[in-house]
Image: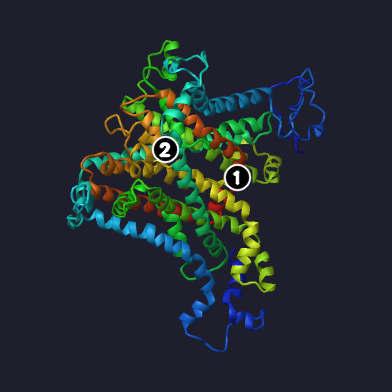
Amino acid sequence: MKTTRTTTKSTTGTTTPDPTTTAPAPSVPAPPAEAGRPRRVRGRGERGPLASVGLHAGLLLAAVVAVFPPFWLLVTSFKPKTETFTTALVKNFTLENYDHVLNDTYFLTWFWNSVVVVVVTTVLGVFISATTGYAVSRFRFPGMRPLMWTLLITQMFPMAILIVPLYNLMAQLRLLNQPVGLIITYLTIAVPFCAWMMKGFFDTIPVSIDESGRVDGLNPFGTFWRLILPLAKPGLAVTGFYSFVTAWAEVAYASAFMTGEENLTLAGGLQTFVNQYVGDWGSMTAAAVIIAVPAAIVFGIAQRHLVAGLTSGAVKS
Amino acid sequence: MAVETGQSVAPAAGGDARGRGRGTGEKSGKAPGPLRRALATHWYAWAMVAPVVTVIAVIIGYPLLRGVWLSLTNADESNVARTIGVNEIEATYEFTGLENYTEILTDGVFWDRLGWTVVWTVGCVSVTFLAGLVLAVMLNRKLRGRALYRIAIILPWGIPAFVSVFAWKMLFNEKNGILNKVLSGGGIDGVPWLGDPTWAKISVIAVNVWLGVPFMLVALLGALQAIPGELLEAAEVDGANAWQRFRNVTLPGIRSVSSTVVLLSTIWTFNMFPVIYLLTRGGPGDSTEILVTYAYRLSFLNSPRDFATSAAWGVLILLLLMAFAVVYRRSLRKQGEVW
């Protein structure tokens, strides 16, 4: 008897079962005749209409809360500056904010700065850490445990501990305000992170593949390069994407190391529109939309893999 | 894992193993010294990790040591090595021992900031976890529009945090923000979201929860879906009610994922710089300043920049986090988790 779950809420016999459920409703035995009218016994995985309403209401509320701030950003970006803070949706549609941001400010320079810094960081980070992820996943060697601990601990480094010495070093090497300086700085975040995550991906590739490579006479480098790396491409992509996103959204180092309007990255640049002295909300919203929309779209495409990657990398440590 | 990799180690013995029969894999005969033997066995592995070890040593290890050293000096803006025009000025700061640390630890500011940082971290992580769990359980049910809800709810994750924070800053605007306009439309006085210490604290936590729920939700949803349906069925057959099934089947089933995401999100929240820096700059006063933003303020916003004290704050923050990770790990171990 699997259908023991009855509820005291009486539902009419004509209740249409939720069409999306695949629960074995047909196997429900004849309704008990205790009540005057037939009462359908709910099968496993089904729920009453009240529960359905509650479920949808809860999720709808969460969805609205999640979507509203970015939505409002988008709406506001199409309003003329004088109407920035009206509560109405767009009354006088205008693109002047976008026009201003793209043509009269350093926005495109900041965008370019961000792209250069972040792309180089990501490529270098993935490139440097791939072999380490593999070695840590496959071999047991002296020094492995300290290495794993180092990778883990550096990931919880607050930027507070490195930012001052790095700043002083960059100042001495005259790399402040240089993309190179920021790239080096971001590598301190990206390398341990990428190595750690890639270990998770390599763990999911069966060791029997390595073994077959050895049988065919490949050394570990050959096995890694010819067999494992091609299989791990999705993992590399996800890792790269993650470090891209992390670097793209970094604020502290970017604000401290890059000064002067034409040297900023997006994180620093956006702050120049709205701070304690100026409140150019119109330009801020337009710039924010240009930054956020592509990111959100790429994220939407990649998100399914992201989660699997992060949890598998972290959980199976 | 250990068993599988044990097999890969043997072939990694390189030339030695290949020369002899692969099946035996036993090193015998020449009996080389322990170092040479280790080198021969682990040569490949060490070569593979070399790039990362080098990079970490150069760009993390060295600055880290330098940071610890700076924290033991009186370095500030006026006495570090610097270049003004064509003049190179030598560093003149001096070693002062643990003076910075005793000063910080005997001053109330550190303990105030630590107290708020703990409240902030615990508040954010617990609310985020609970909200994520509730939403994950809801989304794990079969219902119409599930994919749409999922996409909408994880949207905040897809937007760079600094962009979202500015969106919230606009909503929180005291005079004109939409939140207060809606409230006053309902006959309620506007709330000084970022202007009043208590409200500012609530606001920054709310924004951080908003940013953090999608990750929690997705991780927990994955964990929920990995629980075999038969387990829940069996429990149901045994007469367990919904709550009992949740407590005794679902929660243990997602334990390893939960403990990981809680650890991660605790560390992230503890170090969460952009939310507080961009939303309130630690204000009003220093009511929302957490440890990392305060350390940042010491060396980059205050004048003169106090590098030494800031570095000492950094070291203290790192020690706190490491202590936390050790305690957390130990408590997991006690519960039988292998993390």
Q: For numbered disc 2, what is the local secondary structure?
A: helix
B230 on left or right of B271: right
Image coords of residue B115 (percent x, y): 31, 40
The amino acid pointed to by label 1 is Ala
- Tell me the mark number nearer the camera, choosing from 1 and 2: 2
B200 on left or right of A50: left
Label 1 marks a residue whose chain is B
Residues packed near mark 1 inside 10 Å, few (<14), some (14 to 19) or many (20 plus): many
Above or below, comparing residue B218 to residue B64 in the picture: above
Image coords of residue B98 (percent x, y): 20, 55
Marking on residue B223? 1
| Residue in the foreground of this view, choosing between B242 and B256 | B256
Please say whether residue B134 is visible from this viewpoint. Answer: no
Marking on residue A113? none
Q: For numbered disc 1, what is the local secondary structure?
A: helix
The amino acid pointed to by label 2 is Ala
Task: Give the total number of marks visible in the rendering.
Answer: 2
Marking on residue A267? 2
Which residue is depicted at the point 66% across and 61% down? A206
